[in-house]
Amino acid sequence: MDMKKPLNPMAVAPHSFPAWPPSPMLAHAYVPFQHMGNIFNPMEGLSKGTIFPELYRPYGVDPEYTVDA
Amino acid sequence: MDSARERLLREVMAADFTLIELNLYLNTHPYDQRAITIFNECLQKAKALRQNYERLYGPITPMTPSKCPWQWIEDPWPWQ
């Protein structure tokens, strides 16, 4: 069977790699591929714990991800 | 530690933190030319900040050229 080889994210330019696999399979776990946008300035990044706005999710703000708030 | 010294040290810490973040990102995105450009720019800024701090206040780590007497043991320590 001629299976199309999956893209290797290490070997392609980041924006040609999709955040999610085009055909996700049941019972497989996936982590969406990050695409870097703007970044926080260094002082803001240090105080927020990340330079990536897309990864900034302070504990307690989103009740969906807060156990004891 | 006086406030100007502390402010400059925090800038060095922030610049180093940005580099670590870009380092981790680039480990999984080694072909991201824009991120590499930003990393290289941030590295120059971090080096300049570190040099400026060490020129004014002494070494941040012991792996720094020293005058006599040995500067590393002078107070305050970088974390004081």
Image (cartoon, coloured by chain):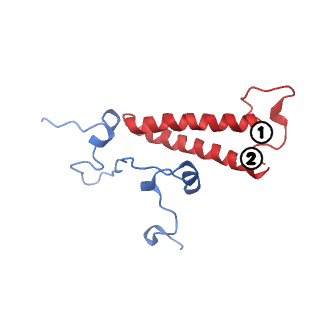
Chain colours: A blue, B red
Q: Nearer the viewer, residue A48 or B49?
A: B49
Instruction: Give the residue displayed 36% in from the left and 34% down from the top.
Output: B31
**Residue hosting label 2:** B5
User: Within 10 Å of the Cα at label 1, are there few (<14), some (14-19), or many (20+) other Cα atoms?
Assistant: some
Place of residue A54 in the rendered image (x, y in percent of width and height, measured from the top left) = 42, 55
Residue B12 rendering spot, x and y as whole percentages = 64, 43
Could you tell me the amino acid type at mark 1? Tyr
Rounded to the nearest whole Å, what is the CA distance between mark 2 and mark 1?
Answer: 7 Å
Dot 2 or dot 1, earlier in sequence? 2
Q: Secondary structure at mark 1?
A: helix
> Across the whole image, how many numbered discs are drawn on residues?
2
Seen at 33% across and 52% down, the residue is A29
The residue most toward the left is: A1
Residue A37 sits above or below residue B59 on the image: below
The residue sitting at 59% across, 56% down in the picture is A47
Q: Which residue is mark 1?
A: B57
Q: Is residue A38 left or right of B44 when viewed as pictured?
A: left
Instruction: Compare residues B51 and A16 and report the one nearer the observer.
Output: B51
Q: Are marks 2 and 1 in contact (CB under 8 Å)?
A: yes
